[in-house]
Amino acid sequence: MHCCSHHTRSAPRHFAGWNLASAIASTLDLPGTYYLQVVEDLFEHNRLAAGRFVALSRKVDLSKLRCPLFLLAARDDDVVAPEQIFATEHLVDQRCSIDKAVAPCGHLGLFMGKEILARIWPDIARWLSH
């Protein structure tokens, strides 16, 4: 979800001079060619937000998305700013109901932080069940 913003952001300080795709690819166990294509399409060229991303042979048009959304951002994220996450709201059908939360953590803390898993994710699970 966080790659959907139409706003771009310069590389965080700790990525200055790095090849972002190579730096991130070294941390995930995905086939190299696939991973680099995802980084290029979603992060470098922002094709999902621009309406130019193709998945399963179909162009993905976020403006046609008509379902409730829960946008979760990390307050101290050095990779994706909360403003980028929340800009997704302007890319989907305006009839979508949208809930938002900002978690007091960094990028990986959204999915790995003990406090966030205990405090934030139960609320999201309740939201999903409705």
Image (cartoon, rainbow, N blue to C red):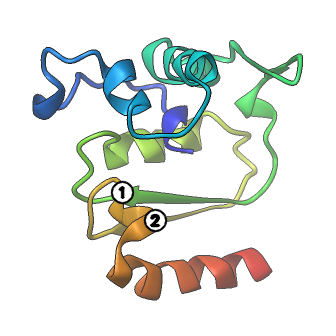
Q: How crowded is mark 1: few (under 14 residues within 10 Å), some or many (20 or more)?
A: few
Numbered label attached to residue 108: 1
Asked if the residues shown at circle 1 and circle 2 are in contact, with their CB atoms under 8 angstroms apart, the answer is yes
Identified at 73% across, 53% down, the residue is 96
Identified at 56% across, 25% down, the residue is 35
Residue identified by numbered label 2: 111
Q: Where is residue 40 in the image (x, y as percent from the top left)?
A: 51, 14
Q: Indicate the amino acid at tag 2.
A: Phe
Q: Indicate the amino acid at tag 1.
A: Leu
Query: In the figure, residue 108 lies in which quadrant?
Result: bottom left
Left or right of residue 38, residue 102 in this image: left
Camera-side residue of 55 and 51: 55
Disc 1 element? loop
Instruction: Find the residue positioned furthest to the right.
Output: 57
Quadrant location of the C terminus?
Answer: bottom right
How many numbered callouts?
A: 2
Left or right of residue 105, residue 101 in this image: right
Numbered label attached to residue 77: none
Identified at 62% across, 26% down, the residue is 31
Identified at 42% across, 86% down, the residue is 119
Left or right of residue 35, residue 43 in this image: left
Q: Distance between the residues labelled 1 and 2?
A: 6 Å
Q: Position of residue 115 (x, y in %)?
A: 34, 83
Camera-side residue of 123 and 42: 42
Q: Can residue 34 be seen in this view?
A: yes
Disc 2 element? helix
Q: Position of residue 67 (x, y in %)?
A: 80, 54
Quadrant location of the N terminus?
Answer: top right
Left or right of residue 13, residue 46 in this image: right
Camera-side residue of 72 and 89: 72
Q: Is residue 117 above or below residue 35?
A: below
